Amino acid sequence: MTLNTEFKTNLKKREAGLNVFIAMRTILVLVAVFICFSSCFTAGIKLPEHIYKRPSYDLHRDTAIGVFRFWSPEYAPGSGYAAATMFYKELLERGFSNVAAEIDVHDIRLDNIMEIAERKNYKLIITGEVSYYISGNELQESRVDEQIKAIDMLTRKTVWHAEVMEIGRPVYRADYIFFSTKGKEAPSPAVLMGRNARKFCNMFLTVSEEHESLSEDMRLVNDGDNYLVTKEYEKAKSLFEKALEINPDNGYALFNLGLVHERQGNKEEAIKMYQKVIALNIDATDKESNAPIKMGQSLVVLAKEHIATLEK
């Protein structure tokens, strides 16, 4: 083999090796891009991992809310303050216009925060707990678990209760044939708390599957019920009337519209609504609605009771 032939052979081998390198690098880039886009399109709206209690409606952005400091584990003092702050900021970013931070209140016993909420006319109070907290590093993952409770001040009942868990893993340094990647520390607990706060807000702003499965007129009735509970009667009245435009024979809308008139002192109008419920003679009870009426009784029986009371 001549020197020139040997040179050409070596040159071809180098070109082949370079082509293999370019091809492998291209494939790796395409795989990375595919993973990135896949995660973007499949992630969807992230909700808390465990939802223990949740009403059939979303949280109105104009609700008067007081956010109180979360409980902290003894080994991570201050983590509850940080978690509550993150959640408060997330509410503001999501358009809640009537939310107040009570995070500087140190006495977060329930009776104390209830007293504060009454004094400041909050309709909903939010408190919680950081139940697990680990700050990671280059070798260890970070993790933050939180629970949250939202309490309706009118009924004194917990209406939302959920638990979230967020884990952040470090990126380890890796050496490959043609290149290497740098390592990266695990995300900070603050980053994980931000993710948890977004999950909680998603829960508050996403109606439950139960609510979505209702007919349009019943969704309006349930939304009106929420205003009825908080004594926002004009808003409730508007929704009940819209429900009746869709379905004039909706007994729940008629009954609840009667309640609105009764509570506003419109005795005659209330009786008219209750009489319409009786005339329908429907076999329905309040279990199909979240209206604040007696559990298990039929609307007809309840309508007759209210008429009897108003005619005394």
Image (tube, helix red, strand yellow):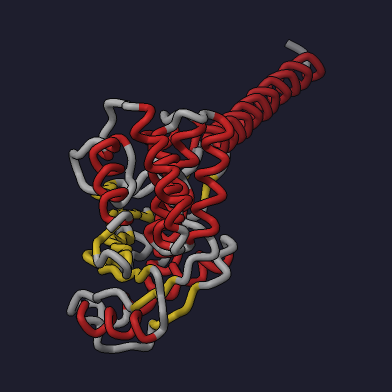
* Viewer-nearest residue: 161 or 302: 302
Left or right? Give the position of 303 relative to 211. left
For the question of whether residue 304 can be seen, the reply is yes
User: Dividing the picture into quarters, in which one does residue 167 lie?
Assistant: bottom left
Left or right? Give the position of 311 relative to 190. left
* Viewer-nearest residue: 261 or 142: 261
Figure check: 166 above or below 104: above
What residue do we see at 25% from left, 69% from top?
129
For the question of whether residue 186 can be seen, the reply is no
User: Dividing the picture into quarters, in which one does residue 79 lie?
Assistant: bottom left
Left or right? Give the position of 44 relative to 155. right
Image quadrant for the C terminus? bottom left
What residue do we see at 32% from left, 64% from top?
152
* Numbered label tally: 0
Q: Where is residue 303 in the image (x, y as percent from the top left)?
A: 30, 43
Image quadrant for the N terminus? top right
Q: Where is residue 216 in the image (x, y as percent from the top left)?
A: 51, 32
